[in-house]
């Protein structure tokens, strides 16, 4: 009888999540795929293109939507929205791939991808800084950012498949795409060769996967040739915003230099689509280790059930939830910021309500390049007698000795 009661209690915990899922758009759901297909057809007609072009990543990049006039032919915009976007674009560049904009439900003004991709007048707030992480101040040479003893970043381009409105490096976006010069890349490679303590290199941008295959593979090959480099990582949003970029040629070219870890940024379940699923499966099938670095964003994913559903769906396509980033204090993005307590509450909910595989680390990037600080929900208290009071995921209080033996409950 006791076992049955416990079983019913555990089942009850899932009820709220199951009910909440009904209102969370997921990119692989039948209705969402139908909406995306209709938008795709609309965009193809607008650009006088066909499905073969749609599946070409170069076409996706070359036809990013970056004018209000084109945008208004794809999504319904009020006169006020049009004027607001025009004001924002005089300060901050924007662009959205045809694929990514096709995922937006045109009838939902609160659509999460719409908020991520389309400029908002709130971006003109004077709050925030251009470089709160002081990346410029942690650049010893070339295109490097170095904050830690054994690892560093190489920034290879400012280009992205879509320019997210919460971008942490919007200071680099400028007015046009560029690839980091060969001289700076060479300086960066030489620096790594000379510093034998560097064992882990992250290639980032912008988005490294906007580079042509031969350019990116050459950089990876040069880094892999350095004996003391053990791990190569690539940070990218392309599987999310231009999944067509993940081609067999790219995968076959890169996999010669394993181990390569690819960290992505899926921020909402609506971004997980049949197309992004195919791209991620192609990477996983070829030995790439996939992780996700979600940014906690106000009004988009600052909800425990959205994050739980996102992380569980990521695991289905072999992406391990790695980090939840607390949004940085970047100028023009402060309306996306939440309280730290919001993130802690989400983490507390995840523990016990989903598997450990679906629980990332919640981190704050300390200002001025001081590094990542894990943010933990404190669930213990040391008592005067030396024992420790713990709170389980269900909120039950138990007392353990220092060696973990049960004192009472």
Image (spheres, rainbow, N blue to C red):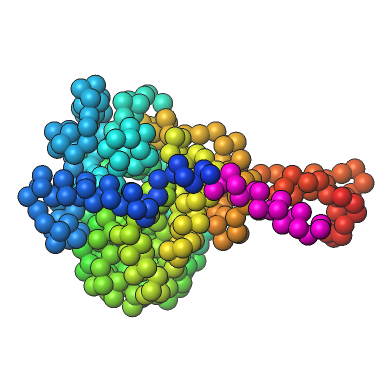
Residue for point 31% across, 25% down: 121
Horizontal side of 15 relative to 279 (left or right) equals right
Task: Magenta stretch: give its range.
Answer: 1-18
The relative height of residue 334 versus residue 310 in the rendered view (above or below) is: above
Horizontal side of 305 relative to 125 (left or right) equals right
Residue for point 45% across, 58% down: 314
Q: Is residue 388 magenta?
A: no
Horizontal side of 324 relative to 244 (left or right) equals right
Horizontal side of 97 relative to 121 (left or right) equals left
Q: How many marks?
A: 0
Residue for point 66% across, 48% down: 12
Our reading of the magenta stretch's main secondary structure is helix
> Which residue lies most toward the right here?
385
> Which residue lies most toward the top here?
80
Asked whether residue 31 appears in the rendered view, the answer is: yes
| Quarter residue 356 falls in | bottom right
The relative height of residue 335 versus residue 248 in the rendered view (above or below) is: above
């Amino acid at each position: 009888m006791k076992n049955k009661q416990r079983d019913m209690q555990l089942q009850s915990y899932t009820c709220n999540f199951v009910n909440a899922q009904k209102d969370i758009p997921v990119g692989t759901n039948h209705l969402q795929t139908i909406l995306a297909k209709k938008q795709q057809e609309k965009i193809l007609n607008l650009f006088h293109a066909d499905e073969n072009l749609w599946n070409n990543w170069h076409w996706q990049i070359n036809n990013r939507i970056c004018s209000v006039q084109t945008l208004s032919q794809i999504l319904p915009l009020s006169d006020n929205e049009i004027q607001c976007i025009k004001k924002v674009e005089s300060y901050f560049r924007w662009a959205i791939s045809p694929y990514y904009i096709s995922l937006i439900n045109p009838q939902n003004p609160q659509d999460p991808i719409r908020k991520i991709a389309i400029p908002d007048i709130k971006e003109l707030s004077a709050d925030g800084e251009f470089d709160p992480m002081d990346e410029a101040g942690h650049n010893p040479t070339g295109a490097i950012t170095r904050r830690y003893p054994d690892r560093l970043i190489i920034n290879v381009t400012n280009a992205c498949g879509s320019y997210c409105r919460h971008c942490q490096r919007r200071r680099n976006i400028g007015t046009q795409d560029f690839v980091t010069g060969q001289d700076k890349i060479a300086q960066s490679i030489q620096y790594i060769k000379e510093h034998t303590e560097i064992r882990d290199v992250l290639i980032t941008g912008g988005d490294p996967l906007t580079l042509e295959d031969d350019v990116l593979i050459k950089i990876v090959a040069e880094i892999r040739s350095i004996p003391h480099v053990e791990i190569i990582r690539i940070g990218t949003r392309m599987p999310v915003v231009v999944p067509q970029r993940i081609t067999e040629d790219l995968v076959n070219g890169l996999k010669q230099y394993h181990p390569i870890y690819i960290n992505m940024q899926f921020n909402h379940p609506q971004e997980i689509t049949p197309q992004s699923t195919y791209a991620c499966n192609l990477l996983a099938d070829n030995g790439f280790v996939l992780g996700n670095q979600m940014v906690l964003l106000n009004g988009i994913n600052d909800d425990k059930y959205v994050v739980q559903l996102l992380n569980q769906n990521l695991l289905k396509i072999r992406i391990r939830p790695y980090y939840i980033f607390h949004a940085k204090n970047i100028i023009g993005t402060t309306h996306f910021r939440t309280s730290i307590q919001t993130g802690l509450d989400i983490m507390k909910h995840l523990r016990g309500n989903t598997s450990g595989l679906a629980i990332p680390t919640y981190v704050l990037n300390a200002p001025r390049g001081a590094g990542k600080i894990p943010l933990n929900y404190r669930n213990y208290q040391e008592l005067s007698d030396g024992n420790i009071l713990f709170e389980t995921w269900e909120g039950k209080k138990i007392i353990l000795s220092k060696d973990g033996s049960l004192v009472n409950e």
